[in-house]
Image: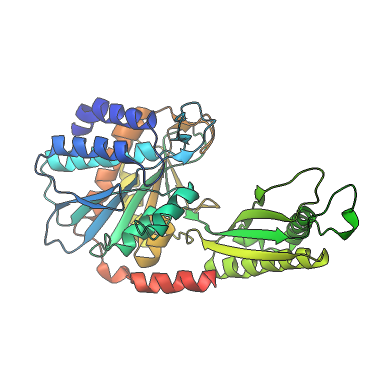
Amino acid sequence: MLFKEQYEEIKDIAEDIYYHPELGYKETRTKEKVMNYLKKVNPYVDFEEFSTTGFKTTMGNPNGDTHIAFIAELDAVYAPSHMYADKNSGAAHNCGHYTQVAIALALYSHLHKSGATLTNKISFIFVPAEEYLDLDYRDGLIKEGTISHYGGKPEAMKLGVFDDIDLGICVHAIGGEFEKRTVEVNCDLAGFLYKKYTFEGKATHAGFDPFSAKNAYSMSTLFNTAVALGRQQLDEAEHVRINPIVMQSDMSTNVVPNQITVGTDLRTKTVDYLKRTALKLDDAANGSALALQGKVNTHTQMGYLPFVQDRYLSTFVKEAFDETNEIEELLNNNFISAAGDIGDLSYMMPCIQIGYSGFTGTIHGDDFIDVDPEYIYETFPRFLANVLEKMDGNIDKEKLYRKSYAEYEKLIAGIIE
């Protein structure tokens, strides 16, 4: 009954966050809204704050054998053309993070008010900056020493927020529309790098003396052509995605351009193929510059690691699904070329991300919004409560794994090099 009783309030909080989106490491209003609700539910709640706007609160058995993290993401996407985008920042909640936050609050409230006796310890971790964007602002935070990572989860990993955690559970809106209420398990995600190529040539008057010029724009065009022609050499099983765009240029029609920067995401299914494909891109850029007697400077920036969901933990979700008559469909073992910093956390410990339907429009698109709030804020949290109940006292820790932040740093350094 608790989920029904709190439904309207949870829905109102979600809608308030939806209509007041904030970009990563700037989620001050969202943080205050969430903390105020948690204080209302539990006046004695304790918070561990981190990474400007992130925070963590723990409940359950303090001596529990297994410590579970339930993770929600606070930030919005940069999408200024979205129908409810913030007019100043361009932020919009068209990835569904606002529903994650509300679902976490519904779960916390249920567990606290029901007086559930938990064998496990559960931490609700509200993480900033999952979306990989607004990079100039984050560069500034890195330069001043406020953060070390663009993504909120790697930053929390560095700060030790997950040091006492055994496994992570996240939830996420499923892209697309569904006739039936649906959950998804074992949907793996790509990893990605961020590549920048600055082509350099020689500027001359385009009418008077184009003959002695070295056209940087032409080099970038040749690079795009090389990337396009090289796609047939890429393994289809790796779901490679490359999307070069012009990042920076100062061009005039009467001057042959001497500099242009092209940037691209590079997404693959595995780390090894990510590194191999990055070398192919570098060769294409170097060859394009050399062909037109120019130069190219290459910058490689780590995005997020691939996410392979933990199949053992997903068995608890499948067990809960088999018992419910409120959710009709289960999707299993898909792969999409989207990425998230849950991939980085899953390198350190086993993680799952449970998908849920209830939306219309295109995820990250201009028309994305929820259309089945009853499912999202009442039925689905009740389903998750059953998943946690299945896990409580039943997780075989021999099937879990643990790696250190130092090991993570070493892996990232190897990819960038």
Q: Nearer the viewer, residue 109 or 398?
A: 109
Question: Is residue 132 among the parts visible in the rendering?
Answer: no
Q: Is residue 368 visible?
A: yes
Q: Is residue 161 left or right of residue 215?
A: left
Q: Residue at x 35, y 28 (%)?
A: 15
User: At which x and y percent is residue 216?
Assistant: 76, 56
The quadrant of the rendering that contains the N terminus is top left
Name the quarter where the C terminus is drawn. bottom right
The residue under the point 41% across, 41% down is 23
When asked about the image quadrant of residue 41, the answer is top left
- Direction from residue 65 to residue 241 in the image, left or right: right
Left or right of 56: which side holds 73?
right
Q: Quadrant of residue 196?
A: bottom right
- Percent x, y of residue 225: 78, 56
* Left/right of residue 266 with respect to residue 231 in the rendered view: left
User: Which percent across, then down, holds residue 390?
Assistant: 24, 52
How many labels sit on residues?
0
Residue sitting at x 14%, y 42%? 112
User: Where is residue 322 drawn, in percent x and y?
Assistant: 34, 46
Which colour style is shown? rainbow
